[in-house]
Image (tube, grey):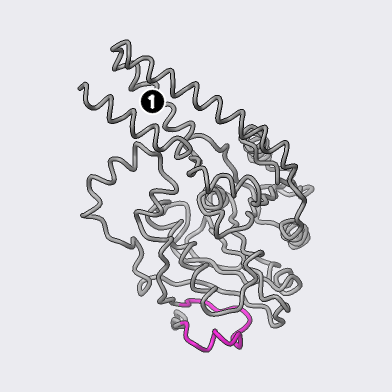
Amino acid sequence: MCALPIVASAQESSGSVTGLQKNVIFSEYFPLSVSLEVARRTLSPLANVEIAKISARLRPQAIDLAQESFSIYVPAQRPAKGYALLVFIPPWQDSHLPPGWGAVLDGLGMIFVSAAKSGNVENVIDRRIPLALLGAHNIMQRYPIDLDRVYIGGFSGGSRVAMRTALAYPDLFRGALLNAGSDPVGGVEALLPADDLFAQFQSSTRLVYVTGSDDSWNIQHDMVSRDSMTAWCVFGTRVESMLKVGHEAATSYALRRALSSLDQRAPIDAEKLSACRARIAKEMAADLRRVSDLLERDKTHEAWQSLTKLDIRYGSLAAAETVQLEERIGSRR
């Protein structure tokens, strides 16, 4: 027999509902989960140009919360500054709490929320990211949350989406738990957001990679991901390995260490970050100048090819310049 859904109510606002709750239905929508806002933060400038052409036909919110359900775990003891929050994106279709995680969450005073039907088979932009945002928002409406301890995480394919979400929403999530799944940033897998958001990600977001020592495929991907973070001036990364573990969700020991690492605030070397950001700005300006030069020489096709590559490499870091160049190219077609 299926469990009856629990409709979140004002009772949660007092923090009186604790423990594991399944099939919870939320009702509060979130401005940051609006379809156009998700697209603006996660897709490339050229993709957003095309979306703008059909924006009048898009639903404001891709998710109908009345049709969705979430699992929640709430520790019995509330920390003095409010609960921490872990929004979890799974690779599977249900929203269960991984084994052994409850005791860790209790010890850290951390609420867990995960949406059903947000696994690897679902659309990232229309479902997985909006569901994570809506889960975070609704928990934050119902429980006292320490805003400095709001994290996103996932396992396997869900971890990749969690990393993409953390990159796009550093104004909401202060860190990410990347459990056996990661991608490089600055490419099609994880496009860069606008400069103000990316600067916040670089300076304040903490990332912890947690992968089993026997999960060689994902260990290699973690290395590539961490190298890309360094290249793009993201220095707040940590690694927590799990010895003799394959492709599995984090053990309770590894989870405790990883989440504790997210709580630690290592100071960022401001001078190093500034110099690194200046290098990126110089490289980006030179690459954009080359596209403009091709246009000046009437090499429209070559200019378009170069622009589409830069659209993926720099994402919304170069949004204004990319759109301007696209308009110049379009006027010559």
143 above or below 146? below
> In terms of depth relative to the viewer, which is nearer, 119 or 39?
39
Residue 34 coordinates in the image, percent (x, y): 37, 60
Quadrant containing the N terminus in the rendered view = bottom left
Side of 151 where 35 appears, left or right: left
Residue at image mark 1: 307
328 above or below 39? above
177 above or below 141? above
Give SS at disc 1: helix
User: Which residue corresponds to the image point at 44% horizontal and 49% vertical from the top-left?
Assistant: 41
Residue 219 coordinates in the image, percent (x, y): 68, 39
User: In which image quadrant can residue 128 be found?
Assistant: bottom left
User: In which image quadrant can residue 217 be found?
Assistant: top right
Side of 258 where 28 appears, left or right: left
Quadrant containing the C terminus in the rendered view = top left
106 above or below 47? below
Which residues fall within the magenta stretch? 8-24
Taking the view exactly as shown, the residue that stands out farthest to the top is: 297
> In terms of depth relative to the viewer, which is nearer, 310 or 135?
310
Q: How many marks?
A: 1
Q: Amino acid at mark 1?
A: Leu
User: Which residue corresponds to the image point at 59% horizontal and 54% vertical from the top-left?
Assistant: 155
User: Which residue corresponds to the image point at 39% horizontal and 37% vertical from the top-left?
Assistant: 320
Residue neighbourhood size for the residue with mark 1, other residues' Cα within 10 Å, grouped as few (<14), some (14–19), many (≥20): many
> In terms of depth relative to the viewer, which is nearer, 101 or 125?
125
Side of 128 where 253 appears, left or right: right
Side of 220 where 141 appears, left or right: left
User: Which residue corresponds to the image point at 51% horizontal and 27% vertical from the top-left?
Assistant: 284
In the image, residue 105 lies in the stretch drawn in magenta: no
Residue 299 coordinates in the image, percent (x, y): 31, 13
